[in-house]
Image (cartoon, helix red, strand yellow):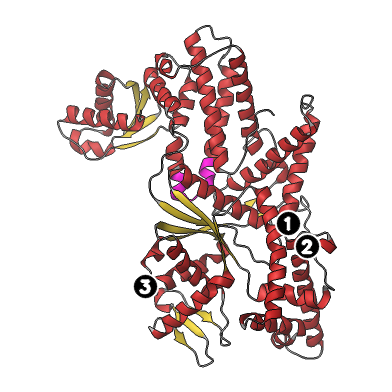
Amino acid sequence: MNLEAQLRTVAHQAVSDTFNQKVEQLQLQPTNAEFEGSHTLVCFPLTKLSRKSPEETAKMIGDHLVANSGVVIRYNVVKGFLNLTIKDSVWAEVFASIYNQQNYLQLPANGREVMVEYSSPNTNKPLHLGHLRNNFLGYSVAEIYTALGYKVHKVQIINDRGIHICKSMAAWQLFGNGETPESSGLKGDKLVGKYYVEFDKNYKAQIAELESKGVTKEEAEKQAPIMKAAINLLQQWEANDPATVQLWKTMNGWVYNGFDATYKRMGVDFEKLYYESNTYLLGKDEVLRGVEQGVFFKKDDGSVWVDLTSDGLDQKLLLRSDGTSVYMTQDIGTAILRFRDFPKIEGQVYTVGNEQEYHFKVLFLILKKLGYTWAEKCYHLSYGMVDLPSGKMKSREGTVVDADDLMQEMVDEAEKQTRELGKIEEMTEADIKGLAEMVGLGALKFFLLKVDPKKRMLFDPNESIQLQGHTGPFIQYTYARIKAILRKATSMNVEVQGDSLKNVDALEGIEREIIFRLNNYHAKLNEAAREYSPAIVSNYAYELAKEYNQFYQSVSIFNEADPTKLKFRIALSKTVADVLKASMRLLGIQVPEKM
């Protein structure tokens, strides 16, 4: 039963009957929290029909709805806003419809397809805190679209070529002495990252030495031997030199193994991986085609550029003078290849930090100039940086918070708190470890996702893991509490028949609020998809959990003498648990049966 559709129908009828005229559209919105009611009809636009004040217009419609609709029991008017109070019997029917609907939490397939890209790391260092927000955002957006019935393709582009990986390769050649993940005991991504740091340290030292001899900083950066070695490796790689390619494959293989372990713990997955080493050639071909068509131009040194000044942007390099490609080159190739691989997708969502906003404006504009109309279907899911309170977390390099380290510290803290709370007598060590993993990672994911993606945020590990407040553990604890109630109901042989839920004709205020919230689930999913914002789902789950806790504190469940109300409250509890579990799953978070 769609309450909003029903309200619109009776409201249209009320307007038609009262003013003897029909209206195409009515503005129906949630009632402001400070007033009684659940839905508000905005009556200002209707005064041209009534030729009366907004207040009188609203009162006339309200009187008609109370007398004739069978839906509205009373109303109040605030200026031109008609606040409607729905009959309890209608709320009971709404809830019965939700409870009996098989596909309420997962809508049926709608035949539409989208693609979501996330992670997309460089293969020269481990994943860090920024990658956590990136992965959790992209994965959650993909899951939200899936819940709405879309077929979603989760992908990433792995930046496996270019000067960044050649820097790690050069440093390993110079200082590695044959070190491997096995010989060092390091994860492969951390080993390669170690040599990227080693490159930077030596590069800075060589620049300083050259500058001390009177060389300018700009020239020193070019002449530093270790940078020359990295550039030489890049040129040898693009020339397909066997030894260089083999070293590249070996070191990238170390990184992929490390990434896979991190992704597994994060709980994210991908349908298809794209590699820059495979897509940049297509990008180069497209750039050269663009030169032939006059879309791009060559400078005297042989480099290829696009002039976007007439579009309010600037000139952008697409191919260097030595013929090597840049990030934009491979992004052009990747976008084209994806639409060839998945021709039914309505668009691509790129989950990339806000420092790349200009890059994606340029990319989408270049694709459009190349004649690809689907460029308008591409969207940059831009997100802000994540800051940490100083001194709260260890950092392997002093500047970047390692993703593996952060996840482990969150799980360790969750285990510590679980043991301190002392409710572990019936739990095995494996159960305790499993719960700590669930709570620690749930706290991390929820905190990173509850903030609007566009905003820069402060991640406070201590605040994120609290059992009270706007946190993941609070929702997990609420779910576990409901599961305990449902187990007790089962032990008491309380069985709920879906049809009987309509028989309740008197509800507590908090019960109406919960049903309103449950009824709003699909609207929130659609809003989250439209805005590409898992924060909308996060906040929805929090508000639902908060309302249920108010219900638990103020309304008797098992002391209720009326068996119809008892069963209704058990069914309401079960539905809240199901929706909480589904909402958290969309955020990539598991919920525990006991806690």
The residue carrying mark 2 is 397
The residue under the point 60% across, 11% down is: 492
Rendered view: 197 above or below 458: below
Q: Quadrant of residue 250?
A: bottom right
The residue carrying mark 1 is 402
Q: Would residue 65 be seen by someone viewing this image from the given angle?
A: yes
The residue carrying mark 3 is 371
Confirm or deny contact between disc 3 and disc 1 (CB under 8 A).
no
Secondary structure type for disc 3: loop
Amino acid type, callout 3: Gly
Q: Quadrant of residue 82?
A: top left
Confirm or deny contact between disc 2 and disc 3 (CB under 8 A).
no
Amino acid type, callout 1: Asp
Packing grade of label 1 (10 A; few <14, some 14-19, many >=20) is: many
Q: Quadrant of residue 201?
A: bottom right
The residue at the far bottom in this view is: 300
Q: Is residue 212 left or right of residue 595?
A: right
Frontmost residue, 83 versus 312: 312
- Give the alpha-carbon distance from disc 2 to disc 3, as whole Å: 45 Å
Rendered view: 171 above or below 474: below
Residue 158 part of the magenta segment: no
Residue 156 placement (x, y as % from top left):
56, 60
Q: Would residue 399 be seen by someone viewing this image from the given angle?
A: no
Confirm or deny contact between disc 2 and disc 1 (CB under 8 A).
yes
Magenta highlight: main SS: helix
Q: Is residue 390 left or right of residue 566?
A: right
Secondary structure type for disc 2: loop
Q: Which mark is residue 153?
A: none
The residue under the point 53% across, 30% down is: 578
Q: Quadrant of the C terminus?
A: top right
Q: Which residues are magenta?
A: 527-537
